[in-house]
Image (spheres, rainbow, N blue to C red):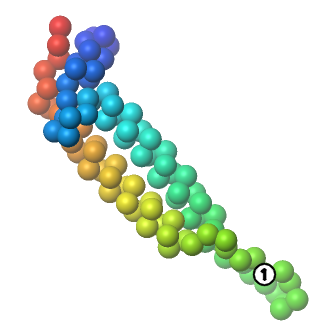
Amino acid sequence: MIRRINRTNSSSKLGDGATVSDSLATRDVLLKRRGVYAELANAAAIGQERYSRSEVKFMSTVSVSDMQSQVDALSREYRELDSRLQEANWLIELVD
């Protein structure tokens, strides 16, 4: 069964011309990239509580809003690709 699925994924193409296997790999990379940007945005957004003006103030060196915009864009790209893969899953027959 696994061999049939792999053969099917390698030979079947989505509407954009990419094989299902390539699209699955792309989807996985999008998820990883999204996770990295989300972690960076969360780390940069952590607030500091200071008790006096003499304490060291930490400043974020990255733009949290830019990182969140990247997270949003990658999330949208992931959802769109995942939807195309789910559609292909219903339409493509397994090869023998």
Q: Quadrant of residue 55?
A: bottom right
Picture coordinates of residue 81, whole percent (x, y)? 28, 45
Q: Residue furthest right?
A: 54
Q: Nearer the viewer, residue 72 or 2?
A: 72
Give the quarter of the figure containing the N terminus: top left
Name the image quarter holding residue 47.
Answer: bottom right
Residue at left offset 14%, top offset 32%: 90
Q: Residues within 10 Å of mark 1 (few under 14, many from 20)?
A: few
Vertical arrangement, residue 10 with respect to residue 85, above or below: above
In the picture of the structure, the residue carrying the numbered disc 1 is 57
Q: Position of residue 89 (x, y in %)?
A: 19, 31
- Residue 25: image x %, image y %? 39, 33
Say whether residue 90 is left or right of residue 24: left
Relative to the observer, which residue lies in front, 35 or 15? 15
Tell me which residue sits at (88%, 89%) in the image: 54
Helix, strand or loop under label 1: loop
Residue at left 37%, top 39%? 26
Q: Is residue 23 above or below residue 75?
A: above
Type of residue at label 1? Lys
Q: How many marks?
A: 1
Quarter of the figure that contains the C terminus? top left
State the residue at coordinates (75%, 76%).
Answer: 58
> Could you say where residue 77 lies in the image, as x and y percent from the top left?
32, 52
Q: Residue lying farthest top?
A: 96
Q: In this picture, is 94 found above or below 67?
A: above
Q: Is residue 87 visible?
A: no
Indicate left or right for 26 with 87 as reference.
Answer: right
Residue 38 visible in the current orientation: yes
Check the image and name the residue furthest to the bottom.
53
